[in-house]
Amino acid sequence: MNARGVLRGRARALRNALFGRGAKRAALRPRGPLYSLALVAVAAWIVHSGFAALLAALARPGAPPAVLRAALALALDVALAGVLLFDLESAVSTLILDRDLDLLRAAPLPPRSILAIKLLDALPRAAAPLVVVALPALIAAAQTLQAPAAAWLAAPVVLALLWAIPLGAGTALALAWLARVPARRVRESLGLVSTLAFAALWLTNLFVLPRIAAEEGEPLERVRALLAAAAPALARTPGGWAAALLGGAPAGEIARSAGALAAAAAASVALAALVASRHLTGVLAAARTPVARPARRRAKRPLPAGSDRTLPARSLRSANSAHPLPTRPARRVPLFIAVMRRDRRLFVRDWTVLGDVLTAALLWTCLPLLALPLRPLRSPWLVRAMLLALAVGLGYEIAARAFPLERRGAAWMRLAPVRARSWAAARFASAGALALALVGVAGASLGLAARLGAEEWLATLAAVIPALALSVTLGLWTGAAFGDPTWTNPRAVLTLGGRLVAAALVVAQMTGWLVLTAAEESGSGSYAWLLPWLPGLAAIGLSAVAVGAVARRINRGGYAIP
């Protein structure tokens, strides 16, 4: 009865958020549900277009159905990996750190009911890879593969089973691990999981993809050969079972795949329920246990031998109001210096964020070195392109966290006697200094390895520094508009819509800077003199617009107030 009442309350809250008084305007804001749904729909349409084109190209020469099913299975497995690596942490955080858990425990509700309700609450975030990748892949496959209508009517059930497999097994493993972690390390452990998963996935792609691209032969034929070779292994994965159900496989294979998919989903859900019944109560108590930090004690200075324990004459005279001592005025610290000091303290306090930033810096720095199988690194244009990628990536990785790192404390910026543009400029200086230092180290190492000349150094800096400045300002705007004050995952300090917008901005910046670099390389005609100045002019104009947008966001109440 209590569980049904909670579910009815969730339904009413969702209805009021979407259709209540004033809800339509709030839902269309950058952190509103309708805004995020629109961005998810756009991303799903892009994935559908690309996957439909791939399947059409694979099927054009008369490829066997097993190759097409292998392509669908690979897309579904990628979606499951996305749920496991990027959204499992959000689901577990909702399960053990949400604000209404104390009310649910006092309802009272058993641990299994709490598990079901909180996983339902995490559905909008945890199911994003399935909606963005798996569902468009299924729709594109329906246009290419020959499958009965009944199979496609069962597609929602198949997606639900696919969602339950990684989420159930991952939740069980996470709860079993958190039950053995000290209480003061529960929150940090959740963030560490995502950082390690991101690093593993990035390194896998960096080592595998360049070597595939370096192989000889026509690209489509290489893709078809790889899918044909991987088809037997993919057929034994959850994505392969779903592809067999929906891809027109033989009747015997369909029955085996349906049984395997249902059994895997049931086993994952049962394992999660079993672990929750044993460990969820203890994990919830550990997550809410206040951590007592030992107070710092100042060592007492020993008095000189033979001295009495009285206050010095200077101290007595300073306490007398009739003869006050002259006071030295406090030295005024510039705003950007104060912001940089505070950012340093925030990064030291949230060590998972600092570790994630350093990991991202290391991975972006390794990107040019891992491209060596494709092309020698002595080309100055390749060095410039790789440093542009590093500048764009690091600017986003650092600047987009500036406002979310303060959580609700960003609302205090309105109370300080400082203009919003000054806050935005100080934030730009703080984030830009850290990003510039990392880009400088990588640029020096790459430039020395490629033996760039003075003219090539100047041309590279003229392109990389404007790209870094623009990336930092756009990252600040993204964090101010889409920051999530309640984040627990250092790779998800933005909302779902914000992550999609940030990815689109990174891709757009990379494309624009590479196009400008290519145009400068082959520039000719009456406007060739303008090409070296165009990156700087574009960065100045767009950065001014982004800083103004950040200042307006601060004037409206800071990012922490939707």
Image: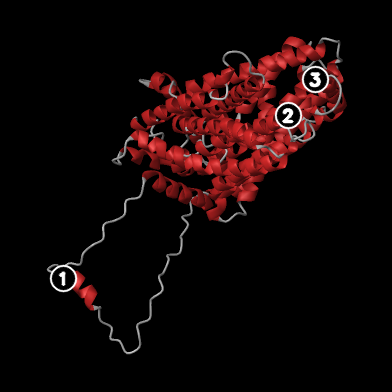
Give the Cα separation between the discs numbered 3 and 1. Answer: 89 Å
Residue 233 lies, in percent from the top left, at 84, 30
Residue 92 lies, in percent from the top left, at 58, 40
Against 63, is 215 above or below?
Answer: below
Q: According to the image, label 3 marks what residue?
A: 69
**Mark in front: 3 vs 1:** 1
Amino acid at dot 2: Asp
Q: Residue at x 46, y 44 (%)?
A: 102
Residue 479 placement, left or right of 383 = left
- Identify the element where label 3 is drawn: helix
- In this view of the protein, can residue 152 be seen by the observer? no
Amino acid at dot 3: Arg
Q: Earlier in the sequence, mark 2 or mark 1?
A: 2
- Quarter of the picture containing the C terminus is top left
Please report contact status of discs 2 and 1: CB closer than 8 Å, yes or no: no
Residue 426 lies, in percent from the top left, at 41, 40
- Identify the element where label 1 is drawn: loop
Q: Earlier in the sequence, mark 3 or mark 1?
A: 3
Q: According to the image, label 1 marks what residue?
A: 320
Q: Nearer the viewer, residue 333 or 121?
A: 333
- Please tell me how crowded label 1 is: few (under 14), some (14-19), or many (20+) other residues with Cα within 10 Å: few
Q: According to the image, label 2 marks what residue?
A: 77
Give the Cα separation between the discs numbered 2 and 3. Answer: 12 Å
Q: Earlier in the sequence, mark 2 or mark 3?
A: 3
